[in-house]
Image (spheres, rainbow, N blue to C red):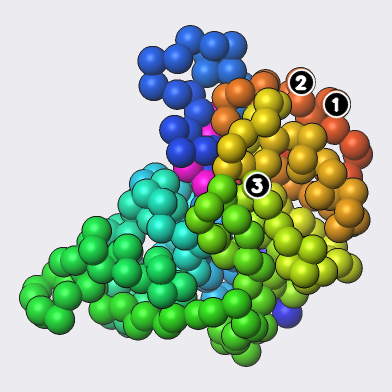
Amino acid sequence: MKKSLTFLGTGTSQGVPVISCSCEVCKSKDKLDKRLRSSVLINIDKKNILIDSGPDLRLQLLREKVMKIDCVLFTHEHRDHVAGIDDLRSLYYSNKNEIPLFMSSQVYEALKRDYSYLFSNLNYFGKPKFLVNIIKNKPFKIFEEKIEPIQVMHYKLPVFGYKISDLAYITDANYISKLEKEKLKGIKILVVNCLQIERHISHFNLDECLDLINIVKPHKAYLTHISHNLGLHKTVQERLPKNIYLAYDGLKINF
């Protein structure tokens, strides 16, 4: 069965370049230093699984020529991970199939509050049909594929990472308990957020990412959710161990 992951976006909440910033990263002409908000598309045997619908979703799906989304997994409710949910309407119009959404009850309550027109009981022309699935920190299946949530903490906010086959995707984390780290043992590919060089209150910095990778020992690791404070893509990549890579927008990997 063919499985792939495409990085739709690898930037933090402000993206890169940051509006009104004139640092060397934001002024860089290297396309690898241009980062939309973080999201990935996982393809499993021609089924498209979207993880998060950030505010750049429209641009990302057009860039990758995505014609359908078969389901969406949400990590948490912050706007840089959900604000593009309205753009799922176009995919519903063209495919006429309700789109399954998988999320914690916490995320669902936030979406009902912030996007009430999409989740109200009132039906009207133009409203997409979603099938909401509330998940807990227990494995579940999508299209016969096992999905295992990884509970991480984004300062005080619980966030779900996801383990799919030999790959784990973790964004917006600065703490993972010993029990949850055990779920990561033996994976081949780890994708993890890496905000910047300096320590941060709610995200892993580079040193913390490298420590986690050393504990988990994946075959390969990809860093995402990157801010301009991490540095130039080329410069940082040259300093990383040979099995650790800075992800970039549009990168596609097989697993």
Locate the N terminus and report the quarter of the image it occupies.
bottom right
Indicate the amino acid at tag 2.
Answer: Thr
Does residue 249 sit above or below 154 in this rendering?
A: above
Locate the C terminus and report the quarter of the image it occupies.
bottom right
Label 3 and label 2: CA atoms lie apart by 24 Å
Question: On the picture, is 237 further left or further right than 138?
Answer: right
Residue 209 % position (x, y)? 76, 43
Question: On the picture, is 159 further left or further right than 61?
Answer: right
Question: On the picture, is 245 further left or further right than 139?
Answer: right
Label 2 and label 1: CA atoms lie apart by 7 Å
Viewer can see residue 233:
no
Pick the residue in front: 9 or 109.
109
Disc number for residue 239:
1
| Crowd around label 3: few <14 · some 14–19 · many ≥20 (10 Å) | many
Which residue appears at 9% of the width and 74% of the height?
A: 125
Give the mark nearest the N terminus, 3 or 1. 3
- Which residue lies under the disc numbered 2? 235
Q: Residue furthest bottom?
A: 144
Viewer can see residue 207:
yes
Is residue 174 found inside the magenta-colored segment of the image?
Answer: no
Q: Which residues are magenta?
A: 34-38
- Which residue lies under the disc numbered 3? 174
Secondary structure under tag 2 reads helix
Badge nearest the viewer, 3 or 1: 3
Q: Residue furthest front?
A: 156
Residue 192 % position (x, y)? 69, 50
Q: Are marks 3 and 1 in contact (CB under 8 Å)?
A: no
| Crowd around label 2: few <14 · some 14–19 · many ≥20 (10 Å) | few
Which residue appears at 66% of the width and 76% of the height?
A: 148
Which residue appears at 32% of the width and 63% of the height?
A: 110
Indicate the amino acid at tag 3.
Answer: Asn
Which residue appears at 74% of the width and 47% of the height?
A: 222
